[in-house]
Amino acid sequence: MQQLKALDKNIWVVYGATLSVGSAGGLALSVLALHLHRHGFSEEDIGTLAGFFALGVALFALPVGALIRRFSAKAVLCCSLLIYGAAVIAFPFSTHSIWWASLLRVFDGAASAGIWVGCETVILARSQGSRKAQVTSLYAAAIALGYMCGPLLSRIVVAFHSMDAAFFTAGLISLATALALFVLLGGESDQQLTPSGEGSELSDVPASQIRSRSVVLRRIKTSCFGNFAYGYFQSSVVLFLPLYLMASKEITRDQTIIIPAFFAAGMLLCVTPLGRLGDRVGPLRLMRGLGVVGILTILGFIVLNDYVAMCVAVFVAGATLASISPLSLALQGTILRAGELSRGNALYNGFYAMGMLVGPPIAGRIFHHWGGPMMLYHLAALWTAFVLFAYFYRNDDPARLRSRQPDLQDAQDVAMSSELVRTEKRDAAA
């Protein structure tokens, strides 16, 4: 508890904003597929629209890192929230045409990229390396709590008004969050922080030694693959799992609306203790274990038929697979220098966007032509590939070196180990 009280106040401001915008996102996403289906969009159309959202993220994820360095995380966050709110409010008016809906989804995705990269840059730059997994897990918990509250709020709004009202409510929440951030968030740069005890341990590295994008990508490849897999999985499941449950498990529409809340609840309750565990045993090692449990859970969706059992499975999926994302974020935070954080976060979210870009169209076509079970099998195969990749590159985690050399206590000592020195020399030569 004392450690949490010592966190930079701007981290708490970002946590609050994340909770708010997570609620807005959960509110809108919980009715998105049902809203589109009601307006005559097929499963393939729904997957295509999700692809346009991911396209917006992919197009803006890399430029947003440069914008943060040029202006500030605060400026990018506020502008992105305003764009996101406007796009969500306008979405119900676009469902008469797939082209208008696609355009709004691109803007939605671009704004989301600005929100994610901005929040993550503030959090990683202002947290200590020895507890980055705990700090990022609290960030993920704020997202999860928002995505748990969003569907519950959505059910109330839909019951008393309409699906359109759910989008309007989500947009207004986003606009209010932008105003709150403008007032509360500090505007100083997050790229060169050196506050006592809270900045990155590598914040004093000269700008001339900041590594190129390709070198940064090689260093954080396991984090990027983990976020790619999660983006692919999350965007596919949130769209097609409700349709699969209604078609194959005879679950009603009202019951499917609150399914995302169980996913978010699993993440919310488990991500913080898992973050503390990740700081102790190493994020990458824990990510592999969570991936194995998640694979078994995905396969369980195929054989389960009871609604309560299905909710439990969704809860476990959230506790395991959703927790991989903040752990991968913490992993790259321990690898990168302070001046590289916006660049690394841009790449990290770019891979998340690529997962969202290719996942729903592929999952939609598999669902349309071969059914829901085959769609779930292919998601299990994706996570299997990640687990194998993470095992092969297990030395990417500095915690593994600490376990092999227990007398090295902090990130700077680990960086002096022979293995990391050799890596730095290869990077410099590249």
Image (tube, helix red, strand yellow):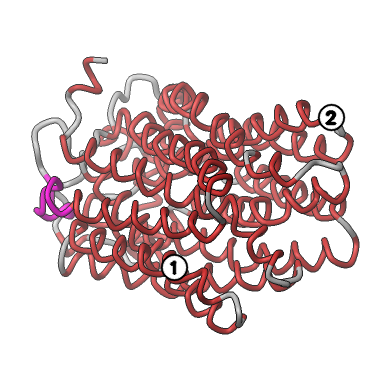
* Amino acid type, callout 2: Asp
Using residue 308 as the reference point, say whether residue 124 is left or right of it.
Answer: left
Q: Which residues are magenta?
A: 182-193
Can you tell which quarter of the image residue 427 is in?
bottom left
- Residue 200 appears at what percent x and percent y? 21, 41
Q: How packed is label 2: few (under 14 Cα within 10 Å), some, or many (20 or more)?
A: few
Can you tell which quarter of the image residue 310 is in?
top right
- Residue 425 appears at what percent x and percent y? 35, 56
Residue bearing mark 2: 306
Q: What is the residue that sits farthest to the top in this orientation?
A: 1
- Residue 211 appears at what percent x and percent y? 30, 62
In this view, 285 is above or below 215:
above
Q: Main secondary structure of the magenta part?
A: loop
Using residue 143 as the reference point, say whether residue 235 is left or right of it.
Answer: right
In this view, 268 is above or below 369:
above
Describe the element under mark 1 as helix, strand or loop: helix
Q: Circles 2 and 1: CB distance less than 8 Å?
A: no
* Amino acid type, callout 1: Asp
Whichever of labels 2 and 1 marks the residue nearer the N terminus, that label is: 1
Q: Looking at the image, which is closer to me, 226 or 182?
A: 182
Quadrant location of the C terminus? bottom left
Q: Is residue 67 magenta?
A: no
Residue bearing mark 1: 108
How many numbered marks does the figure carry? 2
Task: Identify the residue at image location x=60%, y=54%.
Answer: 31
Q: Looking at the image, which is closer to me, 398 or 322?
A: 322
